[in-house]
Amino acid sequence: MTARVRYAPLAALVVLPVLAGMPASADTHTRHEHQPLVTDAALTLEMAVDAAMSAYPEAQILAARQNQAETWAKRGRSLLQERPALMLRYQSDRWGDDAGLDEYEAGIELPLWSWGGRRAVGAYAEAMTTESTAAVSALRWEIAGAVREALWNVALAENARELAAQALQTSTRLVGAVARRFELGDVAERDVLLARSSHLEHETALIDANAAVLDAQRMYRTLTGLNRRPDFAAESLSAVDGIDGTHPALAFADRAVERAEADVEVARQTAGAGTSVLVGTRRERPAFGDAFDDSIGVSVTVPFGGGAHRDTEIAAAARTAAVARAARSRQYRELTLAMHEAAHGLAVARDNLAAASQRSEIAERHEAMGELAYEKGEIELLDLLRIRETAIEARRQLARLQIETKRQTALYNQAVGEMP
């Protein structure tokens, strides 16, 4: 009896409330206040993607792409290949013989299109326009993948927190039961300490789970700019089983190749100086004369040779086109690999889900039997704790696989280019 009286305060201390979500201190809560991410039934995945796209850093590049395409189209409609130039010339002999020679000349130099140059620039502008349109779809596909990943990471984290809270509640009940039995003299103090130690482990697990939820929700908020999230709705598995030119990312890569190849043609047709026409007037007074003569003239400049200079521009454009083709091949390979990985991940999750369901059922029964056996004194508390941890892990694995199956479905749809 003396021992029980001496340790009665210890027994009272171990009967604790559930600490789910409690901050370490009021000061810490003030500094790291976090509003819960509420579920909005009216918010769809498509709407979340739209919100993310409006706030995505790369979105501002789209307008620049479109503007560049428009400026090239405007250049292709121009009547001249390059800017016109104003020519002014003055010649006099007043610093020499000073015989009265004066000449004034003014004109406009008009660079003409090379043969096929205007058509090449127009084709290049059209290629840039289609590439700009494809860039919008490709960026939206990329953002959709990020939003899908962020949402299912939130689902995994919130589920892990829920299971950690349930485990802590079960541990709290066990601490109370052990404390009461200790007061009655049915168990030794070591059981009280063991139960308390297990309880502290579950407290730590819940704190870590809360932190993981915070990180996952913050990532979603940063990505979308929203304080709401859609339901964790399972997507229907896409019937597409391959990567083709309709995939947003691959379509963009194809358009980039077309634009680069059109740039090569522009370089071939317009590299170097082209033919130019100079239209001007001349006013001249000959030496030893008093009257000025006025005339109008036309000059035509036709360049020739210069292949060494033209070839450098063509080679630079051809290199860019080769890089675009290599990027397209790499993109196709990465998309195909992502599709196969998602398909494999989905198959594995589905196969494991059936086994995990059976394991969870067995673990639940084993846990109930273990609790009853401990109450009857047939097993030690350490054995019960091991049984319970096995049951907790079985429940955790089952819940994770249930979510992972939906997540892998979304990843497969993302890989094959299905847009929400």
Image (spheres, grey):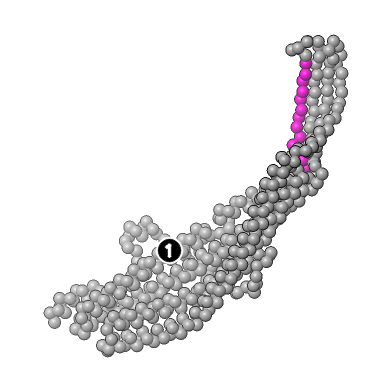
Q: Which residues are magenta?
A: 76-92
x then y, percent, for residue 60: 60, 51
**Residue 230, position as x, y percentages in the image:** 53, 68
Identity, as a three-letter code, of the amino acid under mark 1:
Leu
> Which quarter of the figure is the C terminus placed in?
bottom right
For residue 78, what is the image quadrant? top right
Q: Residue at x 39, y 87 (%)?
A: 365
Q: Is residue 217 left or right of residue 116?
A: left
Residue toward you, 285 or 151: 285
The answer to whether residue 34 is seen in the rendering is yes
Membership of 80 in magenta stretch: yes
Residue hosting label 1? 214
Task: Please rate how many residues cluster around mark 1, counting C-alpha atoms within 10 Å: few if below 14, some from 14 to 19, many from 20.
Answer: some
- Looking at the image, is 282 positioned above or below residue 3? above
Q: Which quarter shows the N terminus?
A: bottom left
Percent position of residue 206, x then y: 37, 69
